[in-house]
Amino acid sequence: MFQTEIILFLQSFASDFLTAIFIFFTEIGRSSFVIPLILLILFGVSFRAGCVLAHLILWNGFITNSLKELFSLPRPANVDSNIRLLGEHFPNPTPFTDMGAKSFFGRLPQNVVDYLRVNRIDSWGFPSGHASMAVAFWGSISLFFKKIWIWIIAGIMIIFIPLSRMYLGRHFLADVMGGMLLGFLVLMIFTNLVFRNEKLKLFLFEKLGKVQLDLKSILFLTYFLIVPLLLLFVPTIDPEDTATFFGLNLGFILLWFRGIPKDSGNIWQRIARVGIAFISYYGVSLALEKGTGLIFKNELGPVEFIRQTLTIFLVFWGSTEISIKLGFFRR
């Protein structure tokens, strides 16, 4: 499954039209698309579903990136100069040609892997983050919103997002299969621990204004506030992702104590809530980026962490409170 012949076969059908199609599916798998979609679900469809989806995607990313660093395996374009980086504006820089696995279940040549680990020219490939996200995210949407048209869209995404990564020369078959398996496992864990856990949903979303600081509450506060800080000491996890997790949790805690908003509202109220969230997200992101850029000339790790935490916190908590004040949400 680490053979480059599969990638070369897919690229033998390459055309400008087909490349544009697969770039589209690849972009759908990026956070630049997923974050606005989660905001749309949070404020326009189901606040509760959006909260769970955000946590699922973050944990899927934490685990995927940690496994990438653990295995440290190159991408197909890194081991074969014949593979084109379709959609990129630069040629394949690898010094190797035809150095993929020689059989379907074979391994990459160890000398090639060792060289690329020392002379790193790209991010690691196994498992595919796009593939794991496709299964975890679109699979969870299918579980939340049991509609036939959503199932069809989810099925298309789960197939074509991973396929796009192979066509574009970014992943082996093993990468996408490993990513899809990982996404499925994350989805199953969340399904059993959260989706089907009525006591948990009652505790987090329905106990409006009646949160008691008992053992259960303390455990959840530990998860929401302490775990994100502990993740900062995990070198395989991007601090920006940890900051997103922390900011989201801070906002949820404040809303939780006062009462999580209900999903009721007519179409115009839902549109207004989504509009406020989008304006807040892009406005706050730009303002904090410009502000910290003026104060700190160099991008420092702590500054980036605080900026990302504040951005997510202000968008999640602030947009919700504004919508409540304006009558678009109600507790």
Image: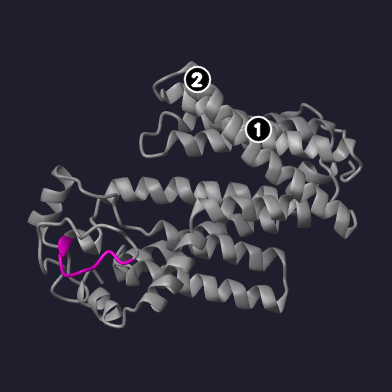
> Does the magenta run of residues contain 80?
yes
Q: Examine the image and state in which quarter residue 107 appears.
A: bottom left
* Percent coordinates x, y for residue 310 in the rendering: 61, 28
Residue at image point 52% right, 22% down: 292
Query: Residue 301 or 206: which is nearer the viewer?
Result: 301
Label tally:
2
- Residue behind mark 2: 294
Quarter of the image for the N terminus: give it.
bottom left
> Does the magenta run of residues contain 123?
no
Secondary element type, mark 2: helix
Q: Which mark is residue 313?
A: 1
Secondary element type, mark 1: helix
Quarter of the image for the C terminus: give it.
top right
For marks 2 and 1, the one nearer the N-term is: 2
Name the kind of residue labelled 1 in the image.
Answer: Phe
Task: In the displayed orientation, state which residue is furthest to the left.
Answer: 111
Query: What's the CA distance linking mark 2 and mark 1?
Result: 22 Å
* Percent coordinates x, y for residue 95 in the rendering: 10, 57
* Percent coordinates x, y for residue 261 in the rendering: 84, 43
Name the kind of residue labelled 2 in the image.
Answer: Leu
Region rendered in magenta:
79-86
The answer to whether residue 216 is left or right of residue 331 is: left
The answer to whether residue 260 is left or right of residue 245 is: right
